[in-house]
Amino acid sequence: MTVVRHHFSPLQRLLHWLMAACVLAMLFIGVGMVSTIMPKYLQLVSIHKTLGIAILLLALIRLVTRLYYGTPPLPLDLPEPMKLAAVLSHYALYILMIGMPLIGWAMLSAASYPIVLYGGIRLPPILPQSDWLHAVLWDAHFYLAFVFFALILLHIAAALFHALVRRDGVFDSMATATGRDDVVPAE
Amino acid sequence: MYPPRSVLGSFLLIAVVIGGLAVAFAYTAGWLTPGRVTPDKVVDAFTPPGVDVLGHRRNHAKGICFTGTFEANGAGVALSRAAFFAQGRHPAFGRFNLGTPNPDAADATVRVRGLGLELSGADGEVWRMAMINAPIFAVSTPQEFYQLLLADGSKDPNAMTAFAKAHPEFAAFGAWAKDGPWTGSYAEERFNSLNSFVFTDGSGTDRTVRWSLLPQAQPVAVPVEELKKRGPDFLEHEITERIRSGPLRWTMIVTVANPGDPTADPTKAWPDDRRTVDVGTLIVQQIEAERDGPCRDINFDPTVLPPGMRTSDDPFPAARSSIYAKSFDLRTAEAKDYPRTATGAKP
């Protein structure tokens, strides 16, 4: 007998909402810290680096859970372009969740900055000092941050569209705190 | 089950959520508050019109690299648990520099001389410093510093007079700039941290300190008119020549604030009777042109501190860190414009 899954696994849901808060905070901290000369600059940079590494670790765990548990199927009546957008945007989000912290870490390495996280944890450089690598990575980190934020807005808009307009259970598959796969959500 | 809701209302709600997030993001980025002093604005304010600064630091643009050793005498352990203070020798390198955004400025036209320094510990600890020869700083806050840059760069001939009038704390720096002695050598300069930092000793006790490098060479005052006759690069020639007859030395002293001393305001000197500790000697052994030297690609960010040191209530190190980072981001992206060969040809 095949059970159709309607929900992400509890672990996936926990990781999703935890990372949602982290990534959103991360983007706001990033854009805020580069636009201030106030003493909070140092705290923001320290949190940014530490949270970045935390997101990298969480994203790697999440990637494993995604590969292991998969996803509930999208509604059969969802138009093909929307299905494609869903799939591609998820690829992009995973690439950014893993890529952005690595780019940041590599960028600091290429600048010969010591990489010190909150609590004095020191990370090794992952690249040798290099002007042009620093410049390329800095640009990538900067512009991809805006791409990331735009993608998150799109993701939220799509989630709300599923929840409020289509009411097709896609939002519930991630949102419901106690959702179990043997309970078919009310249509 | 969701309550029934009009499709229009749903789309409106989505628009409000997305729009709200976008506005919050724009506000955080400073796009909605044009009055905010950002690192970009300060860096822009540094850059004089008509000067080719591409590929160079946006301030302290002219400099020369050195390498050497920091020899700790062990006395600093009483102040900070930083490994650099335990008796021993630590690799050092740095940069003698001039406080000007113009990489081609004539040496005798620049009042402020600086020293950037990096000490590295065996276990990967790094301590970076950026000091200058002025005994105190010009203004009390980074925001005032930005106003000073604007006044200095203003076309209005009265802008600086107006600034000095509105900022009486500027007078002490102004007096030093006008009447303080000039020397003919980087080796004869005293370099001061100006900003205060907090040192933590092995027992966890915090002390707010400033530090200085005192030259072991005897300073000889030379009138600036005399220096102007020595050529545009006399400081670099002199230090390159001087090191041939032996290493150059500075004694590092750390001054401890008493409770109530103005630790947050670098325009205010601390009284002379404050406890000072001689912690060791900086020995400069080799001079290298910046274009080939180890200092070229380093951002001497004064907030790069080892365990046992941290920033204090002085607001400048954070501001300097944010502004130096911007300058570094710009110049690394302009590396192709940096004159890497002796002729200054751009590859």
Image: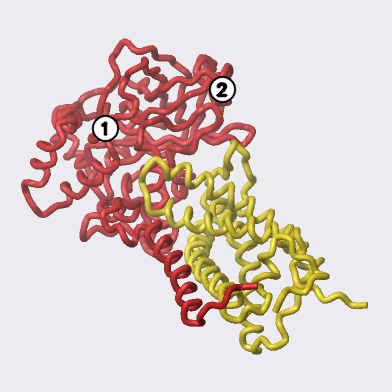
Towards the viewer: A117 or B105: A117
When the figure is inspected, residue B94 is found, relative to residue B13, above or below; the finding is above
Q: Which amino acid type is marked by label 1?
A: Phe
- Give the mark nearer the N terminus: 1 vs 2: 2
Towards the viewer: B188 or B343: B188
Q: Quadrant of the C terminus of chain B?
A: bottom left
Towards the viewer: B27 or B237: B27
The part of the image, by quadrant, that contains residue B230 is top left
Same chain under badges 1 and 2? The reply is: yes
Which residue is found at the position 48% from the left and 24% from the top? B199
When the figure is inspected, residue A141 is found, relative to residue B123, above or below; the finding is below
Could you tell me which chain the residue with mark 2 belongs to? B
Element at badge 1? loop
Element at badge 2? loop
Tint of chain A: yellow
Which residue is found at the position 51% from the left and 66% from the top? A149
Q: Which amino acid type is marked by label 2?
A: Arg
What is the number of the mark on residue B137?
A: 1
Chain letter matching colour red:
B
The x, y position of residue B269, in whole percent, is 27, 22
The x, y position of residue B216, in whole percent, is 37, 20
Going by the image, does B58 lie left or right of A162? left
| Residue to which mark 2 is pinned | B81
Question: Alpha carbon of mark 1 to alpha carbon of mark 2: how far?
Answer: 28 Å
When the figure is inspected, residue B174 is found, relative to residue B3, above or below; the finding is above
The part of the image, by quadrant, that contains residue A38 is top left
Which residue is found at the position 6% from the left and 46% from the top? B158
